[in-house]
Image (cartoon, grey):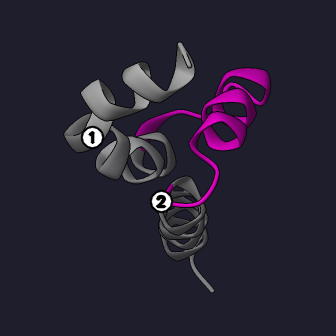
Amino acid sequence: MPKSAVVKSIGWALRKFSKTNAYAVVSFIEQQSTQGLAKREGLKWLSKTSSSLIAHQSV
C-alpha cells in the first residue's frame, strides 16, 4: 500500500473519531506532531464545529 494511502486512512480515522472524542484527536495530533493530509483530515470536521466545541469545553 502506498504511503499516501496510509496517511489518508489515518486522517479519515481521526476525522471519524473526532466526532465522538474531539479532545482526544486534537491531543493525539499535537502529541504525535501529525502533519499534512492526516492532520487536515483529522481536523476537518472540527473546523466546522469549533464554536460548539468551545462552548462545551467551558461547561
Q: Position of residue 44 (x, y in %)?
A: 31, 48
Q: Position of residue 14 (x, y in %)?
A: 58, 58
Work out how far the residue at label 2 is from the one at label 1, CA to CA, in angstroms: 12 Å
Residue at 20%, 42% (x, y): give it: 48
Give the dominant element type of the magenta stretch: helix, strand or loop: helix
Residue at 61%, 64% (x, y): give it: 10
* Callout 2: SS: helix
Q: Which residues are magenta?
A: 19-36
Magenta highlight on residue 22: yes
Hey, which quadrant is residue 40 in on the image? top left
The image shows residue 11, relative to residue 33, as above or below, that is below
Horizontally, is 41 left or right of 20 in the view? left
Tell which of 2 and 35 is nearer to you: 35
Residue at 39%, 22% (x, y): give it: 55
Q: Quadrant of the N terminus?
A: bottom right
Magenta highlight on residue 28: yes
Mark 1 Cα-neighbour bin, 10 Å: few <14, some 14–19, many ≥20: few
* Callout 1: SS: helix
Give the residue number, with chain letter if any, for mark 1: 49
Q: Position of residue 54 (x, y in %)?
A: 41, 20
| Mark sitting earlier along the chain (2/1) | 2
Number of the label disc, if any, that sits on residue 15:
2
Horizontally, is 26 left or right of 19 in the view? right
The image shows residue 15, relative to residue 40, as above or below, that is below
Horizontally, is 22 left or right of 54 in the view? right
